Image (tube, grey):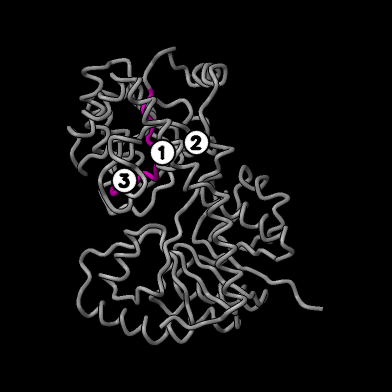
Amino acid sequence: MTRAPAVTSVLWLNPLKYGSMEEYAVHLSRALTQRGWRSILVFSGPLAATVSPHFEGSGAVIEVFEDAGTFKRYRSLVRILRTYRPDIVHFHFFNVFTVLPILASLSRPRAIFFTDHVREGEGISWKTKVQCLLWDRVVLRLLGTRVLAVSDHIKRTLVNKFKMAPGRVQVLYNGVNLRRFQALDPDQATSLRNELHLQSGQAVVICASNLRPEKGISDLLAAAKEVLANKPDCIFLIVGDGSMADKLETEAEELGIERSVRFTGLRSDVDRLMGLADLVAVPSTCGEAAPFVVLEAMASARPTVATRVGGIPEFVEDGVTGILVSPQCPGELAHACLRLVDLPNEAAAMGRAGEGRVKAHFSIDRWVRDTVELYDNALRVRSLVP
């Protein structure tokens, strides 16, 4: 009897909340299970108690690799791969320009995929470019390693900065669960406002992000001070956690806006919060590849005010589904937020346009379907990329 194909998805992800990548893993596992395939999900940390129930019924086998230094990490991954002997190994958030493709090949998979979610191309030395070119043309070519980019921005960075062969990289956009992220009805909105102690009609600006320097939350706080000077009843919800959490709370106090800025910490109900927002702010300062929060805002029929960096312009159509501003420019950010708060009809029109765009191009069902199609093709034809 022919063994059912097995796919091992290795995600450098500590699932402390149920977010977009966790949801993708669940939907992918269900799709593979329905086809009679096996799905092995390998995370860098165990599922949190609040997250684990979401994986029930997905058919996935859950493993955790040891994330305690490079050697132990690789040893742990090799052990897991040799245990399951998957037909396909798919890495997320790992660097393809490492020994990892070689180590993965030891379990003799029929295809190895890497999805590049965060590639940055600034400050790359000529020596690194040469090393990457050789690694790409020799190791990755011989192993038939395939690279998926979550935006055209990432593909351009890999090709132009890291000298990867263009034919090796395929763009596969992320997606969002349209059944989970959608506009709230009036009763749901009232209930959530009461839960959060928000007044009726109070404008809500949401920023859902990891609280790291490159996410630009300090710029948003500076913009919030200007917004609140004109619209003192606005509330800014900062959803997430990270290394800057304490510092950002201190900054809000120093700016004198702490009463109008709420730090919620990690939450698994970002979908509910999105549905309550008047607008969603994405103030990143780095080359953001393809932020899920933009897609989640669009699915919730909410306009986005986002910085013009990385892959964001591939998703936010300036003046149509949201407003794009320059990075590290709190004044521009504040002006765009005030415009959408002052012009609710325009904001609603942008929200509807974003909802239509995400339904047409960025659903999680499309993302999973395209991923499985790539797996199918890899199993049918094992070809080397020139």
Q: Residues within 10 Å of mark 1 (few under 14, many from 20)?
A: many
Q: How far, Cα to Cα, is label 1 from label 3?
A: 10 Å
What secondary structure is marked by label 1? strand
**In the image, residue 45 above or below residue 147:** above
| Local SS, label 3 | helix
Q: Amino acid at mark 2?
A: Val
What range is drawn magenta here? 204-214
Contact flag, marks 1 and 3 (Cβ < 8 Å): no
Q: Nearer the viewer, residue 268 or 366?
A: 366
Asked if disc 2 and disc 3 are in contact, CB closer than 8 Å, the reply is no
Residue 274 lies in the magenta-colored region? no
Q: Earlier in the sequence, mark 1 or mark 3?
A: 1
For the point 26% across and 39% down, which residue is it?
324
Question: Which residue in the protein does label 2 denote?
Answer: 270
Quarter of the rendering occupied by the N terminus:
bottom right
Quarter of the figure with the C terminus: bottom left
Q: Circle 1 sits on which residue?
A: 208
The residue at the point 46 percent across, 40 percent down is 296
Tell me the distance, in whole angstroms, between the alpha carbons under discs 2 and 3: 17 Å
As drawn, is 70 to the left or to the right of 337?
right
Identify the residue at horizontal 49%, vertical 49% (top origin): 175
Dot 3: within a 10 Å radius of its alpha carbon, few (fewer than 14), some, or many (20 or more) residues?
some
Q: Residue furthest top?
A: 200
Residue, disc 3: 215
Res. 30 image quadrant: bottom right
Which amino acid type corresponds to the residue marked 1 in the rendered image?
A: Ala
